[in-house]
Amino acid sequence: MNDYRYTQIEELDKQIQETKALLEDPAMKELAELEIAELEAQKKVLEDGIAASNTKDEHSYDIRNIMLELSGAAGGDEAKLWAEELMRMYTRSGQRKGYHVEQLEENVIKIVGKGAFGAFKYEAGVHRVQRIPATEKKGRVHTSTATVSILPELDDIDLHISDDDIDFEAFRSGGHGGQNVNKVSTAVRLKHKPSGIVVTTSVERSQLQNREIAMQLLRAKLWEIEITKRENEISSLRSTQVGRGDRSEKIKTYNFPQDRLTDHRINKSWKNLPIILAGDIPDAKEELETLNQESA
């Protein structure tokens, strides 16, 4: 598996070997010993992190905060509107559960609180809506979809990213926020060169704060890639994809004419869509956990 911490360990090993050459110099020996001890300590942190990752299952991330990203898929403008409605639903649901919800970007929120990932991880996937759009003049039911990505917030130790692997760019935000935001280069764009992933953040007035938010998003996206690789290596991706949320197929359908939400993974339905979209999302975690265990 391509874990970027291995690259960091290799770099530390090189520094250790180079520093060991200084041990033969009596004038440098004491400083060299201190430097080697520090480098060895950094290496151990990375090795322990890898060892922990290799023994963790998905439940180990359940206590984390999450990054929830939503985007319209099939259905054009109606899909974008549907994604916005789902974003409001998850924001309200997080608040109802007692979590703190932060808007990071137009299509990204951060849900902060112990157990947030465990509470929302099964929402990852494609959410389909069947309804008559407000712009539909002939009364026809349209089908649209939006994708939901649920990613745990990671620390640097969980997934270390080398500064050498990052292209950094600061630019002026074109959004709201007053003269400071529009005249000063506070917005941040990061490109992770090995993977090609690009993230941008402009929600804060401080460039430093935006950079930290962008790094959090980047770590979460790299985690998603690594987990997918790991699942492919250990076994073929489970057909249900519970717990991961395969974006290639729907997990839920919201049928407005019939006022019904259906979870296709467990073949279960609920009524009263207005209440559900107000944040009262039906709890099917126990059934999904069981299905996940059976398909593992």
Image: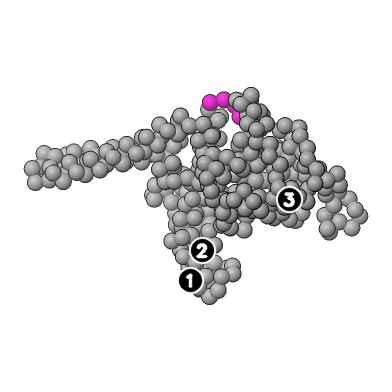
Please say if the residues under marks 3 and 1 sit with CB atoms less than 8 Å apart. no
> Identity of the amino acid at label 3?
Leu
* Disc number placed over residue 150 in the picture, else none: none
> Identity of the amino acid at label 2?
Glu
* Disc number placed over residue 277 in the picture, else none: 3
SS of the residue under disc 1:
loop
User: Is residue 49 or residue 192 the one in the foreground?
Assistant: 49
Label 1: how many residues lie within 10 Å, few (<14), some (14-19) or many (20+)?
Answer: some
User: Is residue 130 or residue 262 the one in the foreground?
Assistant: 262
Please say if the residues under marks 3 and 2 sit with CB atoms less than 8 Å apart. no
Residue range in magenta is: 234-238
What is the spatial separation of the Cα atoms under label 2 and label 1, in whole angstroms?
12 Å
Label 3: how many residues lie within 10 Å, few (<14), some (14-19) or many (20+)?
Answer: some
> Identity of the amino acid at label 1?
Val
| Residue at figure coordinates x 46%, y 55% from the top left | 212
What is the x, y in percent for residue 153?
A: 50, 46
